[in-house]
Amino acid sequence: MPDNGFSRGLQTASQQGVGVDNRRRNHRTKAVLPVRVSGNDGSGTAYCDLAHTLDVTESGIRLGFVRRQLQVGSQLTIQYRQHKVEFRVIWISQLTRLKEHHVGLEALVPRDVWGLGPDSRTRRQPPPPDRASTQVGI
């Protein structure tokens, strides 16, 4: 490959002999799902806002369209359909031109409430009935 001056001094972690640390614990699934975000703000006043997920795992989610200023470390409840799950705010990213945030949340008790896990994608069908046992008089 010709040297264009951009790659000088750059090495990947594998070229340096350093193991790459994948900090992600679960597979992330891109999913835009409507959710209700509720909790108490810094003054103790209860709130309930609409937002949507950008991607989900069993242990956390990334939210979009969050207009309320949240605090890192605060706890809140996410409701999706009839499921309610408690989360902790891990990070907040202010979108520059919009008055909204992307928010990273970690579930206090990880579980799949989204219906996107491997079990929900490939639901097992019951085996077909045995023909010999269902025919009468044979």
Image (tube, grey):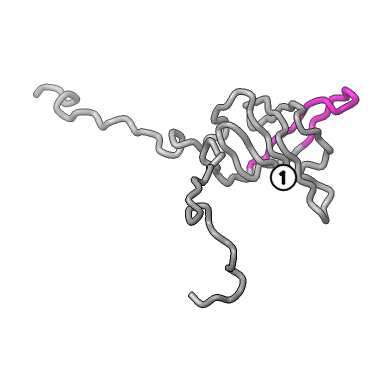
- What residue appears at the point 68 percent right and 34 percent down from the top-left corner? 105
Asked whether 56 or 136 is in front, the reply is 56
Side (left or right) of 24 relative to 137: right
Q: Quadrant of the C terminus?
A: top left
Asked whether 11 or 94 is in front, the reply is 11
Q: Position of residue 51 (x, y in %)?
A: 73, 40
Span highlighted in magenta in the image = 33-49
Q: Which residue was labeled with disc 1?
A: 64
- What residue appears at the point 36 percent right and 33 percent down from the top-left corner? 124
Q: Position of residue 108 (x, y in %)?
A: 64, 24
Side (left or right) of 88 relative to 96: left
Mark 1, residues whose alpha carbon is within 10 Å: few (<14), some, or many (≥20)?
A: many
Determine the secondary structure under disc 1: strand
The answer to whether residue 87 is above or below residue 20 is above
- What residue appears at the point 55 percent right and 42 percent down from the top-left corner? 28
Please identify the residue farthest to the right as the structure is shown.
43
- What residue appears at the point 17 percent right and 30 percent down from the top-left corner? 131
Amino acid carrying mark 1 in the image: Gly
**Quarter of the figure with residue 55:** top right
Side (left or right) of 107 relative to 122: right
**Quarter of the figure with residue 50:** top right
